[in-house]
Amino acid sequence: MLTIRGNRNRLCDGVSRRDFLSIGSLGLGTLALPQLLRAEAAQGVSRSEKSVIMIYLTGGPPHQDMVDLKPDAPAEIRGEFSPIATNVGGIQLCEHLPRLAGMMDKLISIRTLVGSDGRHSSFQCVTGHTFGSQPQGGWPEVGSVLSRLRGPATAGIPASLDLSMHMEHLPYNLPGPGFLGQGHAPFKPTGPSKNDMLLPELLVNRFDDRRQLLNGLDAVKRNLERSGFPPGADAFTQQALDVLTSNKLADALDLEKEDPRIRERYGEDDPKILPYSNKGYQAINSKFLLARRLVEAGARCVTVSWADFDWHGANFQHGKKVLPKLDEGLSALVMDLHERGLQDDVTVVVWGEFGRTPKINENAGRDHWSRNSCAILAGGGMQTGQQLGTSNRHAEEPIDRPVHFDEVFSTIYRNLGIAPDQVTIDDLGGRPRYLQDKFQPIDELI
């Protein structure tokens, strides 16, 4: 294994945040990834260039302050924000989302998202299943499913990456590969898991920044090129080692290689946007840009947790700061995908685990509400410029076209070229499990 030992307080990625490459989940110590890739090839798994960017708005975003404002409701329901027109007639968004309003033709707003199991957790948003329905080992998140079914699309780029920050409320952190095992865990190029960073015969006592780390990995690559891969290593072993020895992943993660004008469009990172941001709830807009760079480089799934919306108090005070930053970063991502011709290949999903109460509480906040919530979708070759669902006068519940969490997941898989009600993955007991078998893709978007 390649162990990186260094200063615990300085983990620089050379970009502006304290991130670094964590490689332990690849299972290189036992060549788990090559073995799995070999098995997948033997099964004739098809290839696809489609991908998904999952943006998880932790804590439950307030649907009635973002996409389903009720200006005619009583003051204790409607709150402080006003709706504004979008560039699609009849559709409105919050006044603090003007950029998204100006590109509504490239978006889908879901105002009646139902089926939340009410858990303060990322689980349902990234697996498409309720927490209580789990088989032994747990349901895998979507990136792990894609890793299992498709494998890496490009040598040197993991199939799935998790750009999320480590969050103090542990269930917010992504659940991982579940019963698929650590060989399909998302690659995490951020975070504190430096003990996992190991390759045979390389020991580095200290790295002050990521540039030195890359120099070390380049040395490994040169040694492998000079002496060849280990005896007995086949193409699948080489594919696994490519993650460490190729420059592709490092290049995709290096924002210094990005056009400064594009970087500026995404806006400045705000690591102190909320009073409790030091607990992992930061508005790091550059991660939206990293997500685009990674899918463009070949990643199949990139997940980003962003800020926090669990505003039991000061809902509007926080919203005035957080929503404009989301507007800035998300609009830049969608525009970027369109300018690069990726709008049919990359599905963007933006949501949280539930909505917020219609009535504002005594602390000027909104509490948990699982009967109705919202989502914003883009790309994936979907029919955009739509608003799905109508809620009742207080945004409590749908009065027409409820859209279930599972429908969204079926749509994601459909966009990726996978029939979720036909494809199965085996759980730990060897029982085949359908990816989704209750809900079909959303007809209006196909």
Image (cartoon, grey):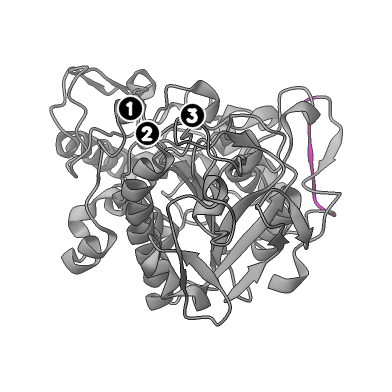
Sequence order check, earlier mark of 3 and 2: 3
Of all residues, the one furthest to the left in this rendering is: 208
Q: Residue at x 36, y 29 (%)?
A: 280
- Amino acid on which disc 2 is placed: Tyr
Q: Position of residue 389 (x, y in %)?
A: 71, 64
In-image side of 316 versus 264 (left or right): right
Contact? badges 1 and 2 (CB < 8 Å):
yes
Q: Is the residue marked by circle 1 packed among few (<14), some (14-19), or many (20+) residues within 10 Å?
A: some
Q: State the CA–CA distance, disc 1 to disc 2.
A: 7 Å
Amino acid carrying mark 3 in the image: Ser
**Which residue carries the number 1 mark?**
276
- Mark 3 and mark 2: Cα distance apart in space: 24 Å
| Residue 299 falls within the magenta-colored stretch | no
Foreground mark, 1 or 2? Answer: 1
| Residue bearing mark 3 | 25
Residue at (79, 48) in percent of width and height? 436
Residue 446: image location, x then y, percent: 71, 73
The mark nearer the N terminus, 3 or 1, is: 3
- Which one is in front in this view, the residue at disc 3 or the one at disc 2? 2
Residue 213 at x, y percent in the picture: 21, 34
| Residue under pointer 2 | 281
427 in magenta: yes
Residue range (magenta)? 422-428
Q: Are marks 3 and 2 in contact (CB under 8 Å)?
A: no
Mark 3, mark 1: which one is toward the viewer?
1
The amino acid on which the numbered mark 1 sits, given as a three-letter code, is Tyr
Mark 1, secondary structure of its residue: loop
Name the quarter where the N terminus is drawn: top left
Task: Calculate the distance from the C-alpha at mark 3 to the C-alpha at mark 1.
Answer: 29 Å
Q: Position of residue 89 (x, y in %)?
A: 55, 82
> Does residue 109 appear to the left or right of 430 in the view shown?
left
